[in-house]
Image (cartoon, rainbow, N blue to C red):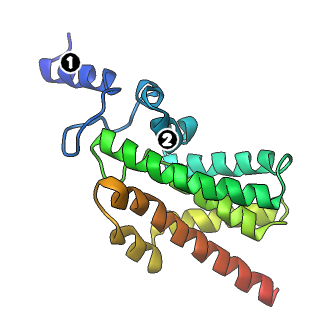
């Protein structure tokens, strides 16, 4: 028999599809039911990549890499640029709504920030072979996870709920993308 406090926690996690106001308790990880409850949740959670129980940011970046490789077969450079711009605007909305519904200002399960930022890296750094893309992936994950210097600054700049907080979820990943692109540019210059 399950103790009452564990039973109530399990019940709360099972019904996590209900939007939460900031400051209210929420599950550590959202469920598929939560993701499917609102279109913003699907986008912000990277269409399921953010549901990964381990390293959702890495899984989201891997999803971005795969999606980019597939999309570049059907889209030219300008169309990919428009997709990234549109993905940024849609992501700003989706991250804002999802963070508010989760009651957490920057949940780790929101991975759309990794997706659109890594698309930007690949879009600007291509053409690259598999190993060049793998290096870009590793650099981006380092800057996003370790948050050295400017990435840590960007991570603290826009906090909270609402549009400002939604932009903050994306902004530090764009700074991580810039740092990744800077290293790639220096590498190419001296290679």
The residue at the far left in this view is 4
Q: Earlier in the sequence, mark 1 or mark 2?
A: 1
Q: Determine the residue positioned at 55% across, 42% down.
A: 46
The quarter of the rendered structure image containing the C terminus is bottom right
User: Regarding mark 1 in the picture, which secondary structure is present there?
Assistant: helix
Q: Which residue is mark 2?
A: 45
Which of discs 1 and 2 lies nearer the camera? The answer is 2
Q: Is residue 4 visible?
A: yes
Mark linked to residue 7: 1
Q: Residue at x 60, y 52 (%)?
A: 87
Measured as percent of width and height from the top left, residue 183 is found at: 66, 80
Residue 139 in the image: state x and y as whole percent: 62, 68
As drawn, 28 above or below 7: below
The residue that appears at 58% across and 46% down in the rendered structure is 59
User: In the drawing, does residue 113 fall left or right of residue 25?
Assistant: right
Q: Is residue 114 left or right of residue 16?
A: right
The quadrant of the picture occupied by the N terminus is top left
Q: Are marks 1 and 2 in contact (CB under 8 Å)?
A: no
Q: What mark, if any, has residue 137 been given in the picture?
A: none
Question: What's the distance in space between the residues labelled 1 and 2, CA to CA?
Answer: 27 Å
The residue closer to the viewer here, 10 or 120, is 120
Dot 1 crowding, Cα within 10 Å, few <14, some 14–19, many 20+: few
Residue 15 x, y percent position in the rendering = 30, 22
Q: Tell me if I can see residue 148 in this picture.
A: no
Which residue is painted at 26% across and 22% down in the image? 10
| Few, some or many residues within 10 Å of mark 2 (<14, 14–19, 20+) | many
* SS at mark 2 in the image: loop
- Residue 12 is drawn in which quadrant? top left
Q: x%, y% of residue 122?
A: 72, 62
Residue furthest to the top: 1
Depth check: 131 or 184 in front?
184
């Amino acid at each position: 028999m399950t103790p009452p406090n564990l039973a109530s926690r399990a019940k709360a996690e099972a019904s996590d599809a209900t939007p939460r106001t900031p400051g209210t308790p929420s599950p550590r990880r959202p469920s598929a039911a939560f993701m499917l409850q609102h279109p913003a949740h699907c986008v912000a959670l990277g269409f399921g990549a953010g549901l990964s129980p381990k390293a959702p940011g890495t899984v989201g970046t891997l999803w971005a890499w795969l999606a980019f490789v597939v999309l570049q077969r059907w889209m030219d450079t300008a169309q990919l640029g428009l997709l990234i711009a549109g993905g940024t605007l849609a992501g700003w909305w989706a991250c804002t709504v999802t963070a508010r519904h989760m009651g957490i200002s920057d949940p780790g399960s929101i991975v759309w920030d990794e997706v659109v930022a890594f698309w930007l890296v690949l879009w600007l750094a291509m053409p690259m072979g598999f190993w060049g893309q793998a290096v870009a992936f590793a650099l981006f994950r380092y800057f996003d996870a370790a948050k050295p210097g400017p990435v840590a600054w960007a991570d603290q700049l826009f906090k909270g709920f609402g549009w400002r907080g939604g932009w903050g979820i994306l902004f530090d990943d764009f700074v991580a993308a810039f740092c990744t692109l800077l290293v790639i540019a220096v590498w190419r210059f001296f290679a």
